[in-house]
Amino acid sequence: PTQAARYFSEHRSDLVNTDAIACADQDGSGPVRSLIMEKDLMYNNKHVVILGGGDVRTCEVDAAVKLGLQVSYLGDATLLSHYIGHPQVTLYDVDMTNTELCLAALKNATVQPDIDAVVSFTENGLLTASALAKKLRANANALFPVIHTKDKTRMRALLQQDALLALPFKHCNSVTDALEFFQQHQSAILKPVYGAGSIGVSKVTTEQDVIDYFQTAPSTAVLMEKFVEGEEYSVESLS
């Protein structure tokens, strides 16, 4: 809420519809996203594709509608059933993680206006949003940063180019791979290559810890990194 209020104060003159400030609720991330949506996409009749959301995230769809945007929603349409028949919103009940299915749904529409932007407000839709935008020549986050932020092995390899950020790591497809790395570095961090919310992240200090991790690992593709002692910092950003 504090970030939202500051942003609103700084950009009040740029906002065409201040009603979206009402979105300042739920998980605390909605208000900032909605206000940025107002500043950067404030053009009537523009067409935006939104992947995922629904439930507490309907705030983004509400804000887009208030701006006069045409919205195509890809995801669980039952979460937005109150928009059925709405003149500005088209719902596609489709697996948002499947780029080809999403693309087919959009192309099979009876009347399909040009698409200006593709966005996702959920982790599982980020890669699809970028891939769709590239195929449709629409605005979106570029594929390179999305691929590298979702694939932890790719990101770790990219960070190796900076001496300050370099860290011993290994992409492990089996417990044997992980044990070999552990024998070299002892204390280590294991995490799924693809994942979010710190799910499946674990520190291991013995070989038995490594074996136990792979017995219950949420994914067969695992990144193993040398554990580093020190203060931990978390940096949040909007882009």
Image (cartoon, rainbow, N blue to C red):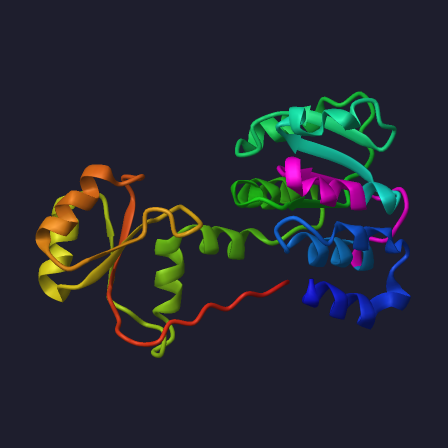
The reply to whether residue 47 is in sight is no
On-image quarter of the C terminus: bottom right
Q: Left or right of 48: which side holds 169?
A: left
Q: In percent of the image, x 52 and y 57: which residue is there?
A: 145
On-image quarter of the N terminus: bottom right
The reply to whether residue 156 is in sight is yes
Check the image and report above or below for 70 versus 86: below
Q: In percent of the image, x 85 and y 33: which residue is there?
A: 88
Front in this rendered view, residue 66 or 220: 66
Query: To which quarter of the image does residue 160 belong?
Result: bottom left
Q: Left or right of 170: which side holds 159?
A: right
Check the image and report above or below for 41 versus 1: above
Seen as rendered, the residue at the extreme bottom is: 164
Front in this rendered view, residue 187 or 120: 187
Q: Left or right of 87: which side holds 157?
A: left
Residue 164 location (% of width, % of height): 35, 79
Query: To which quarter of the image does residue 167 belong?
Result: bottom left
Residue 2 location (% of width, % of height): 69, 67
Residue 47 location (% of width, % of height): 80, 41
Query: To which quarter of the image does residue 127 belong?
Result: top right
User: Which range of residues does the magenta coloring cover?
Assistant: 40-63
Whether 61 is among the magenta residues is: yes
Q: Left or right of 175: which side holds 38?
A: right
Q: In percent of the image, x 23 and y 38: which residue is there?
A: 216
Front in this rendered view, residue 228 or 118: 228
Whether 6 is among the magenta residues is: no
Q: In percent of the image, x 9 and y 53: which residue is there?
A: 207
